[in-house]
Image (spheres, rainbow, N blue to C red):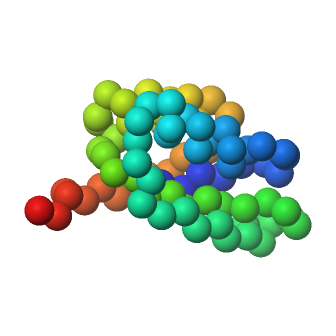
């Protein structure tokens, strides 16, 4: 998942709180500058779950209210 947001205090914290509130485990978080403006970042976040899962859909819906989300893919869990 890529989350793109304006630079303001607490953006990443609010994103992470949505995943926490819906009991979604995070596997990885990477931030990269957008190269548009100083202080503006893309967040690449790997989660355990599928966008169609009820909890994941709720969390993404909350995050999408203030941020742009692009889903890069979804992979089955290794057994």
Please indicate, yes or no, whether residue 57 appears anywhere in the rendered image: no
Q: Quadrant of residue 55?
A: top left
Identified at 56% across, 29% down, the residue is 62
In the image as oriented, which residue stretches furthest toward the left? Answer: 79
Identified at 32% across, 28% down, the residue is 54
With respect to residue 68, does 2 lie above or below?
below
* Residue 65 spot, x, y in % from top left: 62, 29
Q: Quadrant of residue 30?
A: bottom right
With respect to residue 35, does 24 lie above or below?
above
Horizontal arrangement in the rendering, residue 76 relative to residue 12 (left or right): left
* Residue 28 spot, x, y in % from top left: 48, 64
Counting the numbered discs, the total is 0
Identified at 67% across, 38% down, the residue is 14
* Residue 61 spot, x, y in % from top left: 50, 30
Q: Quadrant of residue 43?
A: bottom right
Identified at 50% across, 30% down, the residue is 21
In the image as oriented, which residue stretches furthest toward the right? Answer: 38
Query: Is residue 14 or residue 75 the one in the foreground?
Result: 14
With respect to residue 76, does 16 lie above or below?
above
With respect to residue 55, does 72 lie above or below?
below
Quadrant where the C terminus is found in the figure = bottom left
Horizontal arrangement in the rendering, residue 29 relative to residue 47 (left or right): right
Please indicate, yes or no, whether residue 32 appears anywhere in the rendered image: yes
* Residue 52 spot, x, y in % from top left: 29, 36
Horizontal arrangement in the rendering, residue 4 relative to residue 25 (left or right): right
Horizontal arrangement in the rendering, residue 37 relative to residue 16 (left or right): right
């Amino acid at each position: 998942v890529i989350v793109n947001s304006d630079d303001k205090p607490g953006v990443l914290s609010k994103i992470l709180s949505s995943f926490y509130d819906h009991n979604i485990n995070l596997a990885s978080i990477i931030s990269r500058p957008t190269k548009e403006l100083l202080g503006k970042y893309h967040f690449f976040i790997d989660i355990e779950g599928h966008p169609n899962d009820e909890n994941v859909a709720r969390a993404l819906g909350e995050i999408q209210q203030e941020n742009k989300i692009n889903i890069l893919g979804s992979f089955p869990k290794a057994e």
